[in-house]
Amino acid sequence: MRVHLGALAGAAAVTGALSFVLLATAIGTDFWYIIDTERLESEDRGRLEPLSSHSGLWRTCRVQTPACTPLMNPFWPGNVTVSDSSRQLLTMHGTFVILLPLSLILMVFGGMMGFLSFLLRAYLLLLLSGMLFLFGALVTLAGMSVYIAYSAAAFRAARCLLQEQALLDRVDIRFGWSLALGWVSFASQLLTGAAFLAAARALGPRPGQDQPI
C-alpha cells in the first residue's frame, strides 16, 4: 500500500501543479480569441489598415501595434445604461472572469489539503481534496463554456452591426492557444481529483473494519 500511495501522491502532485500552471497561464495571456484579417488586407492591396487582433479575458491587442485596449469593466455601475444585448455580454463576461480565477483558488486550497492528507495519511482529507479538485474542474468547465457562449454572442452582435457577410467570410476568426491551455487544465484537474479519490479508497476502511478517525 505504501508504494501505491506514493505513486498516487506523485501523480496528484504532478497533475495538480500542471493544472494550476496551465490555467494561470491561460488567464494571464491574450490569445483566447484571434481575428486574422490578413486575407482581407491582401485582397484590398493595402488600402485597409491592419485590423488583426488577439484577445484575452481582460483586454484585446492589435497585432501590428504593441498597445492593448482593456475590455469594458463588467462590474462598472454605469453599465446599466447600455442596451440589452450589451448588458447580456457584460453579464457573461463578468461570469467567466469570476469563475476561472475561482478555480485557481480552489486548486490552491485543494493542493494544501492534499499535501496534508498524504502527510497524515488521513482518509477524510484525501476524500475532501479529491472532491475539491473535481468541483474546481466543474467551475473551470463552466467558465470555459460561458466564454465560448460569450464569443459566439459577440460574433453575432458584430455580424448584425456590420451587415456584410461577404466581408466576414474573408476574415479568419478562431479560438487561440490560451483556450486550449484551459481545456488541458480542466482535464488535469479531473485526473488530480481522481488520484486523490483513488488514494482515499486505498487508505479507506475495508468491509468489516472500523473506520479510522
Image (tube, rainbow, N blue to C red):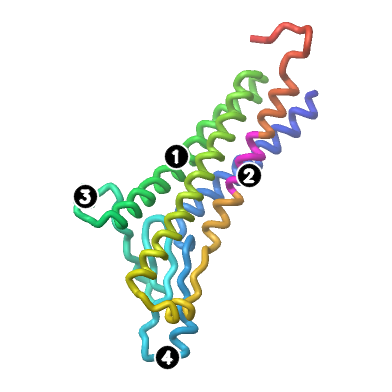
Q: Main secondary structure of the magenta part?
A: helix
Q: Which residue is mark 1?
A: 102
* Residue 166 higher or lower than 102, as above or below: below
Q: Nearer the viewer, mark 4 or mark 2?
A: 4
**45 or 151, which lies in front?**
151
Locate the N terminus and report the quarter of the image it occupies: top right
Is residue 111 visible from the viewing direction of this image? no
Where is residue 32? Give x, y as percent: 48, 60
1 and 2 marks in contact (CB < 8 Å): no
Q: Which residue is mark 3?
A: 80
Where is residue 142? Give x, y as percent: 50, 44
Name the amino acid type tagged 3.
Answer: Val
Of mark 4 and mark 3, the one earlier in the sequence is 4
Of mark 1 and mark 3, the one earlier in the sequence is 3
Residue at x 56% of width, y 40% of height: 137
Left or right: where does residue 137 sit relative to residue 83?
right
Q: Which residue is mark 4?
A: 44
Q: Read off the magenta span.
A: 185-193
What distance separates the C-alpha of mark 3 from that of mark 2?
Answer: 39 Å
Q: Nearer the viewer, mark 3 or mark 2?
A: 3
Q: Which residue is mark 2?
A: 188
Name the amino acid type tagged 1.
Answer: Leu
For label 3, the SS is helix
For label 1, the SS is helix
Residue at x 36% of width, y 75% of height: 163
* Residue 38 higher or lower than 71, as above or below: below
What distance separates the C-alpha of mark 4 from that of mark 1?
Answer: 45 Å
For label 2, the SS is helix
What distance separates the C-alpha of mark 1 from that of mark 3?
Answer: 25 Å
**94 or 116, which lies in front?**
94
